Image (spheres, rainbow, N blue to C red):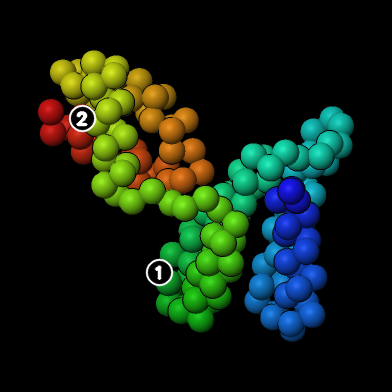
Amino acid sequence: MATLKEQLRTDLTTAMKARDSLRSSTLRMVLTAVTTAEVAGTTARELSDQEVLEVLTREAKKRREAATAFEDGGRTESAEKERAEAEVIADYLPAQLGSDEIAAIVSGAIEQTGAADEGMRAMGKVMGVVQPQVKGRADGGAVAAEVRRQLGAS
């Protein structure tokens, strides 16, 4: 089975042959980010698939934030380009959790930690349990908002 990085390289070649400029430029950008992460620190090393996924998640988040910023600034064309790049990156990420699934995970974590009566003081405790379960599959802001909602409602 090919590693995620090899898959990205193969897909880049395919996109270049198909003259798909959006996909090829996005994959080039992502591969550059992966290479940068590999040489960061004291020694260069090969990233694991999990680490490559973290880089992809970070890059997708950057695109979403940039799209929002461009939209707020009235630059819809740039916002659309950022959203299109985020969609290309999303093809390589695990399926995102829906709001119902996030709510179920959060309520389970609140039950598990016994934080129902503590209110917002237990936010860190609950997030500590929830984060490993949703890592890479849900936006941290959405998860935090759900934790706040459930802790504030109790």
**Is 152 in front, or is 55?**
55
- Amino acid of disc 1: Asp
Q: Residue at x 43, y 77 (%)?
A: 74
Depicted 71 relative to depicted 116: above or below: below
Q: Name the residue at the front extreme.
A: 1
Q: Residue at x 56, y 62 (%)?
A: 91
Comparing labels 1 and 2, the label whose residue is closer to the camera: 2
What residue does disc 1 label? 72
x%, y% of residue 70?
48, 70
| Left/right of residue 88 with respect to residue 39 in the rendered view | left
Res. 34 mark: none
- Amino acid of disc 2: Leu
x%, y% of residue 71?
43, 72
| Left/right of residue 154 with respect to residue 52 in the rendered view | left
- Which quadrant of the figure contains the C terminus? top left
Residue 65 visible, this angle? yes
Q: Residue at x 51, y 43 (%)?
A: 136
**Is 85 in front, or is 104?**
104
Mark 2 secondary-structure assignment: helix
x%, y% of residue 147?
28, 35
Q: Residues within 10 Å of mark 1 (few under 14, many from 20)?
A: few
Q: CA distance from mark 1 to mark 2?
A: 31 Å
- Tell which circle, 1 or 2, labels the residue nearer the N-terminal end: 1
Depicted 27 relative to depicted 62: above or below: below
| Left/right of residue 76 with respect to residue 106 in the rendered view | right
**Is 119 in front, or is 96?**
96
Q: Quadrant of residue 81?
A: bottom right
Mark 1 secondary-structure assignment: helix
Q: Residue at x 80, y 70 (%)?
A: 13
Q: Residues within 10 Å of mark 2 (few under 14, many from 20)?
A: many
Res. 151 mark: 2
Q: Quadrant of residue 72?
A: bottom left
